[in-house]
Image (tube, rainbow, N blue to C red):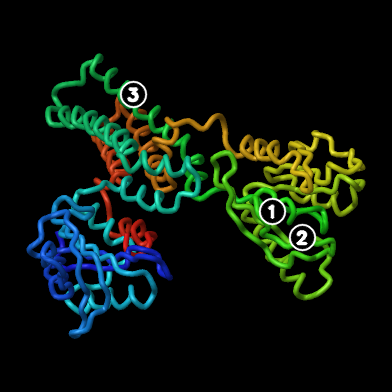
Amino acid sequence: MFDDTIAAIATPLGEGGLAVIRISGAQALAVADKTFVPIGKNSTKPSAATSHTIHYGRMVRAGQTVDEVLCAVLRAPRTYTREDVVEITCHGGILATKTVLDTVLENGARLALPGEFTQRAFLNGRLDLTQAEAVADLIHSRTDLALRAANEQLAGKLSARINQLRDDLMHTLAHIEAHLDFPEEDIAPNTRTQLELQLVGGLAFMEELLRTAREGQILRRGIRAAIVGRPNAGKSSLLNQLLGHDRAIVSHIAGTTRDTIEETANVRGIPVVFIDTAGLREAQNEIEREGIRRSRESLARAELILHVLDAAEPLTPADEVLLAEFAGKPRILVRNKADLPIQLNALARTRHAPVVDVSCTTGHGLEALKDAIKALVWSGAITNEMAQVTINSRHQDALRRARESTSLALENLRADASLEFVALDLRLAANAVGEIVGKTTTEYLLDTIFRQFCLGK
């Protein structure tokens, strides 16, 4: 529990029907008492209210009414932070919301840091670290699958498996340390075999989780797919078709796209960040030169290339240059203008890239292109079971360290090395696994995780 009381706006800034200011801490009710004036016989001061009730009244600052509000009172420990919480719902709008927040801050609360409400939920035992991270994933979800994965993690599905893994490692470590306490007694052969099997099982489970890392990262941040090609091949038209609305300007004039355009679309359940790039050619002026430079930067960060070619024209030297340039990246060759007589017949599949014919005019081939994108970036089917245990990059790093230490422990155990070495490696492995759920943490780790949250969460 914390001594101070924090407050922040918990809804997005801007004009809207409603906004919520959240207060949490030991003095949350006292702070609300100083600012909230109940109206009507069924409303009361927050400090006198029963838990999980809502009261109508006014927010008052220096004797003047700030806004008519609803005040929700939530008493510890049945709250998000396991502290007393008050949530004030006022009219939306930047000025009204800010004034209500300022009134709260003037009466004893301090402005919360990004993610501080969720950090308190973790530190007070309301959530473990994987569940806390799932809150951020839930907020930033861009597809149904990402939302489902975040909800599964928030429900503790990943935590349960990680905790079981850590318990198994600790159980093996306890056996090893028991033999260290009685060095005159050797480990019986059947006991040694059992300990080895436990470590082998733990390693197999770590490998299983590590195989979900790529899929987990795709669900959380998406895949960056750069649309490239020579001018007027139909890159901007393809972007508009994939998004389902006109985002990029389409013109027969070469060089229309002067800057990179990024938009996210849901492609077969996968968030794909499509990047429309300036046509790659010899720049005609300073503005186009800058657009091409930015395109090159985006291409360097892209994980997938959609190379658009004009199917109504034969392959040009410029096309050949781009085909060679992006040969080392995962890519799909998109023959656009398939509704016209095909002149581009030199695209053999020996270029080690799938070829998809589309027409941005009629929409033909777009579903096949989406299938090709999914097949290239996601291995196998997307299942509900997979959504339950997809790990992020932090989990991946901890599991890799745990796997390395567990492998060393197994090697030393099999080589009949000193049990002190086995115990040391197992302790390192258990600590690394504990980092995932927050059973072994550092202040730096917590700051790194929670500062990525939005303010008020």
Q: Amino acid at mark 1?
A: Asn
Q: Position of residue 295 (x, y in %)?
A: 70, 61
Answer few, some or many: residues within 10 Å of disc 3's Cα (few below 14, many 20 plus, some between 14 and 19). Answer: few
Q: Nearer the viewer, residue 269 or 283?
A: 269
Q: Quadrant of the C terminus?
A: bottom left
The mark lying in front, picked from 3 and 1, is 1
Answer above or below: position of 352 versus 295: above
> What is the spatial separation of the Cα atoms under label 1 and label 2, in whole angstroms?
9 Å
* Residue located beneath label 2 in the image: 250
> What is the spatial separation of the Cα atoms under label 3 and label 1, in whole angstroms?
60 Å
Q: Nearer the viewer, residue 46 or 184?
A: 46
Q: Amino acid at mark 3?
A: Arg
Which circle marks residue 240 in the picture? 1
Q: Position of residue 273 (x, y in %)?
A: 59, 52
Q: Is residue 352 left or right of residue 201?
A: right
> What is the spatial separation of the Cα atoms under label 2 and label 3, in whole angstroms?
67 Å
Q: Amino acid at mark 2?
A: Val
Q: Nearer the viewer, residue 356 or 209?
A: 356
Residue at the limit of the structure toward the left, as seen here:
48
* Residue located beneath label 3 in the image: 414
Q: Position of residue 221 (x, y in %)?
A: 50, 50
Q: Quadrant of the N terminus?
A: bottom left
Q: Secondary structure at mark 1?
A: helix
